[in-house]
Structure formats: structure tokens, C-alpha cells
Amino acid sequence: MWIRENPVLNRELMTTLRAPQAFVLQFAYVAALGALVYFYWPAGDDGSRMVGPGVARRLYDIFFLGQFCLVALLAPTFAAGSITGEKERKTYEMLLVSPLRPHTILIGKLFSSLGYLVILILSSLPLMILCYLLGGLLLSEIARSYLVLVLAAGTFGLLSIACSSGFARTSSALVVSYLVVLPLAALCVALTRADDPATRDFASVAILPPICLMIWTVVGIVVNNRLLRPLDVGGQGGGVVDEEEEMKYAIGVVIDRDAFPDRLFAPAKRNDLMPDGTNPVLDKELRSEIFSQGTLMLRVVIQLSMLLSIPLMAALLFLRSDLAAYYVAYVLTFNLLVGPVFSAGSITQERERQTLALLLTTLLTPSRIVIAKLTAAMRVSTVLTFLLTEQILLAYLMLPELRGRPWTLAVFLLIIAATCLTTSSVGLMCSALSRRTSTAMVLSYMTLLILFVLPLGVRWYLQGVSGEAALSPGRLAAITVTSPYAAAVSVPMHLYRAGDSWGSDRPDVAASPLVQFPGGWDAPVWMVFLVACPILAVVFSGVAWLAFLWRWWRAGDGA
């Protein structure tokens, strides 16, 4: 009854579940899962459908991992804007002064944010039961998997709402939510996908529920107190924070514009006239824009990324130096999360601040404006990303196994740089095509996931459907040329030892597959990626320029 009478929950659910997009998305989701089961079902020589426990186990793995990734990626998307959206719409204070208690607001926001996601998860249950009929699965395994999914959705959603209550912008809350949620998601997958069945059952039933309940209790109390005693209401200054006043009470990392490397992404404020030929948009974006809403998000991002890099550095660089590509994958993931934050709002924020018309009517050409927006966003995200490469440089300097192949370090750095360019250009394109920053952020993440992550899933799926005999390794490798993860893993990391020739391969390490091209020549995945990635970035930037040019023409016609 207390849920049915929650006005926040009723309002949010009516606006979400009554939209036609909700039904279309659910239908597409179930149809995609049904097609997955149909095409994955093996066929015998006579064309009849044959079943087996191996097929059921692989389908179960695909369903569980796919839906868990869906929860980890969509829960912050739905929940991170639950409270910041009220702040951006200027309705936050009205919500706080209403007769609703803070815990009522929290429960309404949590259930409304995760309600549709839980519906999508439960929609796959009939197809999972179909996999059970194939044999080789237990009902307890299926029940355990859905228990893990529901617990993960509640935990990730509540953590995202906590981030939403602490920031003023949805973009800031979203990126911090991902930085908190994704490491927890990786740990949860490692526990629930262990090889030992007893370990999986114990982790799913005895470890995860009490830990999740503890997190729910602590985070719920924090958010409840935050709503009961808000610190970010009453001001009418547009959310602008005094930088010097904020630094007096900053905890942890303090950003100093005059110190290295802070001045690379945040030059000191200009106290003189701009020289002739200076791009004013670029100067304004670099010197003022990232500090206009305070430095809390920036400091939290730096602290969390550095904290996570320490155990990963020890495990993937110093204990197993042949796994250096997986640490590079962590750096790439960081840029995938951070890159759109500084570029997806480049143009939409001008619209939200009602300064886009003023910008369009200046003497600056659209190309100069777009280049300035892209350069400023890419500079900030690139500097923050390359701060995490210090551990890679340290490993190559200290470990003799890695010093034997210095060219792999150059390849890793080029892959990271190309990824920074792509994420910034995708965010700028989505910002030019969208009307709101939150929409541009979600669209940017979806585009990057399609480019970076989806090819890996497609390759894994095709390997299970067709086998290596039907699809050659070269064709499978060609699917992943847009993924920096595949490019990083394709760099040969067989270790160089004293006495080995420069071109000799370790016999215990398999060579990475090569991408096959018409004409009989081939190339490694990382080389094709380094060629294709800048081309894609130019295409995305060109689309952003055309969209901005169209708005510029409309502004001229209106004048």
C-alpha cells in the first residue's frame, strides 16, 4: 500500500511505462533474445534441431552475462539523473518542501528508476526456461542468476541515486556512478562465475545478499540525510561555484592551475587581453568551463581512478607482465566513461544556458567553434586518461621482460590516444544532434558501446554458432577492428628473454589472428584499428560540423 500511494513513484512510472517507446523497446529486447536462441540452436545434418547440455550451458552464460552487463550499464543511466534532473529542471526545492518524507522520495526514485529495467530482466525468464528444457541446467542455477541480477540492479541503482544527490549535473553523477559501479560489477561476475559450483552457490546465496543489504542500508541513510538536510538549495546563481572558496574545504586531491600536470587540462585564468588570432571559444572552454560547476566531480574521478589503478597495476603489470594489455583495457574503459562527459555537453549546454543563439550570431565560423569544442574536450579527457599510463611506463622501466619489447609500449600509447580522439568526437557529434545534455550522454555511451564492446560479443557469439571451421580467425578478427580492447589484446605480449632473437615467438603463446583483406594480404588488429579509428573520428566530427552548420544557417535565416 505504501508503494501504491507514493506520488513520486506513480508520477515517474506513468510518464515512463505509458510511453510508446517502452513497449517498443521491450518488444525489441525480447525479439533479440528469441532470435539469439533460435540461431544458436544447433542443427543436425538432416536439418532437424538437435539439443544438448553444452548448448544450454552456453546459452545460459550468454543470457546471464549479457543481462548482467545490461544491468551494470543501464542502472546508472536510469538512476543517475533521478535527483539531478530535478535540480536541472528547477523543481528540486519544490520536491523538498513538499509533505513527502525523504525516505518516501528515495523509495519512489529508486523503484521508478529500476522498475522498467526489472521488467526487461523478467521478460527473458520464459526464454531462460526454454534453455532449461534443453538439459544440463538446474532450476536452482536459474533462480540464483535472477537473484544476482535483482540484487545487482538494486545496489547499482541505489549507488547511482547517491551520486545523483551529491552533484548538480546529470553528466557528473553519471560518470561517477559508472566509476563506482563497474568495479563492483567486475567483482560480482568474478564471484558468481567461478569454476567451482560450490563457490558460485556460496557467493550468490551467502555472500552477495548480506553485502547488498549492508550497502542498501548505509547508502539509504546517507541519501536520506542528504535529502533531509540539503546543502545545495537556496542559491539563484545558476549553480556557479566559487573556485577559491571551494578549494578551502576540498578533501583529497586539490587542483592547482599553476602546477603540473593540472595546467595541461586547466590553464590559469587569463588576467590580460587575448592576443589577436586566439579562438575565444577554446580559451573560454579551457580556462573556465570545467570549473563553472565546481571541481568535485573532477577530483572524485581522479581519486577513484588512481585508487583502482594500484591493485590492477600490481596484478596485471608486475605479477603477470604478459597481461599488460588488460591494464591498458582499464585505461581505455576509463576514457570511455570520462570522454563523453566533457564533449557530450559541448553544444547542448549552450542551448540549456540559452547562449546558443548568441554563439551562432558571433563572427566565428562554425568550423572554428566545432574545432574549439572538440579540442577543449579532447584535451581534458586525454590528460586525465594519460595520468593512468604512468604505471605502464613504470612497468616498462622496471621489468626486464617488458624492456625487451619497447615497441609494444608505443603501440599501447597510440591505441589510447586514438581512443581519446574517438570518444571526444562521438560525444561532440551526439551533442550536436541532441537537444539535452542527458540525451547526448546516453546516446554517446550507446554509440561507443556499439563500436567498442559489441564487436567482441558478436565474435564470441559467432565462435559458438559457427565454429572455427565455418568462420576463419581472420574473418572473426575483422569484426573487431573498431574495438580498442581487441586492438590492445592483439598486441603480441610474449615476453622477451635473454638469448631470444628479436623476431622469435615464444612457443607456448599463440599468435594473434590477422585481419584478412581481399588480395591476399593481412594485418594485425591493432594496426587496422590505428588506421580506422582516426577515419571514424573525422567522420563523427564532420557530422557534428554539418549539424552545427545547419543550426548556423537557420540562425542566419531567422535574423
Image (cartoon, rainbow, N blue to C red):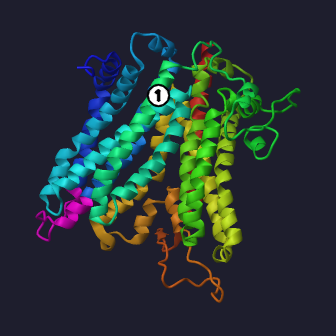
Please tell me which residue is depicted at 70% across the width and 71% down the height of the picture: 398
Point out residue 160 in the picture as x, y percentages from the top left corner: 46, 35
Vertical placement of 533 versus 90: above or below?
below
Q: At numbered mark 1, what does the secondary structure look like: helix, strand or loop?
A: helix
Vertical placement of 65 versus 356: above or below?
below
Point out residue 114 in the picture as x, y percentages from the top left corner: 34, 33
Circle 1 residue: 223
Quadrant containing the C terminus is: top right
Query: Observer-nearest residue: 339 or 318?
Result: 318
To which quarter of the image does residue 234 belong?
Answer: top right
Tell me if residue 50 is in the magenta stretch. yes
To which quarter of the image does residue 1 belong?
Answer: top left
Point out residue 379 in the picture as x, y percentages from the top left corner: 69, 43
Please tell me which residue is depicted at 21% across the width and 52% down the height of the picture: 142
Tell me if residue 235 is in the magenta stretch. no
Please provide the residue range marked out in magenta.
38-59
Please tell me which residue is depicted at 88% across the width and 31% down the height of the picture: 275
